[in-house]
Amino acid sequence: MGDVYLSAAAVERVFAAQVLLDRHLRSDAGGRCTTCGELEPCSSRLGAQRVFAQYGYLPRRRPGHAAATPAPETRFNWLSD
């Protein structure tokens, strides 16, 4: 199977879908999106997933991005004191 190249418009759609997915990734304890308040998976998240499926791409993974509290910068913060 040969290489597949996306047009500039398709790349923009995939990039926009990634941004949208990042914004609508977190949910509260009740299962609602913390950005829009819809039950998970919210319509924005589903739309972003459709774009990835349409172009055969997987979203970028950012470990710790969905955590409720940000991860510490380093394991050894006490060393800097």
Image (cartoon, rainbow, N blue to C red):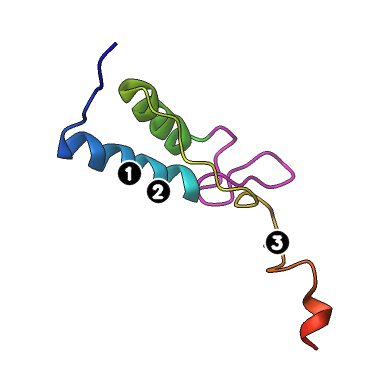
**Is residue 32 one of those drawn in magenta?**
yes
First reached walking from the N terminus: tag 3 or tag 1: 1
Identify the magenta region.
24-41
Kindly identify which residue carries mark 3: 71
- Label 2: few (<14), some or many (≥20) within 10 Å? few
The local secondary structure at tag 1 comes to helix
Which residue is located at x 24 percent, y 42 percent?
12
Q: Nearer the viewer, residue 29 or 8?
A: 8
Which residue is located at x 72 percent, y 68 percent?
74
**Relative to 1, is 17 above or below?**
below
Residue 19 tag number: 2
Structural distance between the alpha carbons of marks 2 and 3? 20 Å
Observer-side mark, 2 or 3, equals: 3
**Relative to 77, is 35 above or below?**
above
The local secondary structure at tag 2 comes to helix
Location of the N terminus (image quadrant): top left
The furthest residue to the top = 1
Identify which amino acid the numbered label 3 is placed on.
Answer: Ala
Residue 29, position in %: x, y? Answer: 74, 45
**32 sits left or right of 29 in the view:** left
First reached walking from the N terminus: tag 2 or tag 3: 2
Residue 49, position in %: x, y? Answer: 43, 29
Classify residue 4 by image quadrant.
top left
Location of the C terminus (image quadrant): bottom right
**Is residue 23 one of those drawn in magenta?**
no
**78 sits left or right of 23 in the view:** right
Residue 56, position in %: x, y? Answer: 36, 22
Kindly identify which residue carries mark 1: 15
